[in-house]
Image (tube, rainbow, N blue to C red):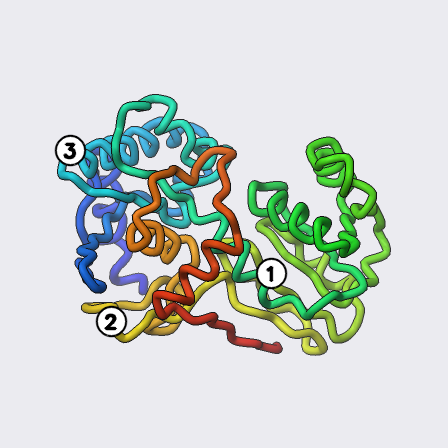
């Protein structure tokens, strides 16, 4: 590893100065032709405020280039979306309202995958992690089903309560007891918070990155993802930590959007109909994927 470090450092500096998006994979499904474009930035650069302007410039340039080439849909990758970075992709549409290409952040399908991992009518569900578009959509969906949502973080609870419709807001409960056996976990959950969970808790992440496994007596589920159908061609690489033939729900959402020919964006505050998107994904042969793990 240390032998490769000088080459890695040189590569990082070069992409830092001269980097632009590039194609890493080409795929086909039915009549749909697809390309995967990479933004040449490291994950730590996404966390630095000073890098956000340049990253957004590259993403916006890629969207405009795809639009000029006649692409119908562009889905934002895991690090290339978020409220803090670009308003969940909404900034690109606001800057370029006349573009024909549809921008998809994949929230609806990712939420559908998470919701379909939850047993029918649980007594309650605990939700924790950073406040995000996903956290709000999941909380709203659970409340509409009459399920109590426990929020152990005061700041998150206050924002959710202020944003949710009046008819469901009473289903959100602030509690620091951590007694629920079903956790929906977002980004930035601390190890000490995991240690407060009771025995046999199921951790279901709605985060883009997997939760660090800390407990032997609890079950850890996969990040939102689906298995690709046999018709999906030329898939020769693994996506991050997922096994081959599995793909993040955020990425699948863009594919389903294009296959269905939907004439709408899903970015910013816009969320597609969760049930509609879920049925469409299954109809095109995508299947739920999950790996339950213990320490």
Does dot 3 land on a helix, a strand or a loop?
helix
Mark 1 in CB contact with mark 3 (< 8 angstroms): no
Residue 231 circle label: 2
Residue 115 circle label: 1
> What is the x, y in percent for residue 173?
82, 47
In this view, 5 is above or below 133: below
Name which of mark 1 and mark 2 comes first in the sequence. 1
Q: Nearer the viewer, mark 3 or mark 2?
A: 2
The residue drawn where x is 39% and y is 31% is: 52
The residue drawn where x is 60% and y is 52% is: 186
Give the class, few, some or many, for how many residues have Cα within 10 Å of label 1's Cα (few <14, many ≥20). Answer: some
Name which of mark 3 and mark 2 comes first in the sequence. 3
Give the class, few, some or many, for how many residues have Cα within 10 Å of label 2's Cα (few <14, many ≥20). Answer: few
Judge left or right: residue 65 versus residue 109: left
Residue 68 circle label: 3
In this view, 210 is above or below 69: below
Name which of mark 1 and mark 3 comes first in the sequence. 3
- Return the residue nearer the eye: 139 or 50: 139
């Amino acid at each position: 590893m240390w032998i490769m470090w000088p080459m890695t450092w040189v590569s990082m500096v070069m992409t830092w100065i001269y980097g632009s998006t590039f194609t890493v994979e080409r795929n086909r499904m039915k009549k749909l032709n697809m390309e995967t474009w990479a933004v040449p930035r490291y994950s730590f650069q996404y966390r630095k405020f000073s890098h956000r302007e340049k990253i957004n410039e590259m993403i916006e340039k890629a969207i405009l280039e795809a639009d000029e080439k006649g692409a119908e849909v562009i889905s934002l990758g895991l690090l290339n979306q978020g409220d803090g970075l670009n308003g969940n992709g909404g900034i690109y549409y606001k800057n370029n309202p006349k573009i024909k290409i549809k921008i998809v952040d994949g929230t609806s399908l990712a939420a559908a995958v998470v919701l379909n991992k939850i047993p029918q009518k649980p007594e309650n569900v605990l939700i924790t992690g950073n406040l995000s578009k996903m956290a709000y959509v999941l909380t709203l969906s659970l409340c509409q089903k009459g399920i109590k949502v426990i929020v152990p973080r005061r700041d998150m609870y206050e924002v959710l309560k202020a944003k949710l419709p009046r008819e469901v807001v009473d289903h959100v409960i602030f509690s620091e007891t951590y007694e629920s056996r079903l956790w929906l976990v977002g980004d930035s959950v601390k190890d000490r918070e995991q240690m407060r969970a009771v025995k046999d808790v199921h951790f279901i992440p709605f985060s883009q990155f997997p939760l660090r496994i800390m407990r032997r007596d609890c079950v850890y589920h996969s990040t939102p993802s689906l298995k690709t159908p046999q018709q999906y061609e030329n898939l020769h690489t693994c996506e991050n930590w997922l096994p081959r033939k599995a793909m993040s729900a955020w990425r699948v959402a863009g594919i389903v959007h294009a296959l269905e020919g939907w004439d709408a964006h899903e970015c910013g505050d816009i969320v597609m109909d969760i049930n509609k998107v879920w049925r469409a994904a299954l109809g095109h042969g995508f299947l739920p994927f999950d790996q339950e793990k213990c320490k």
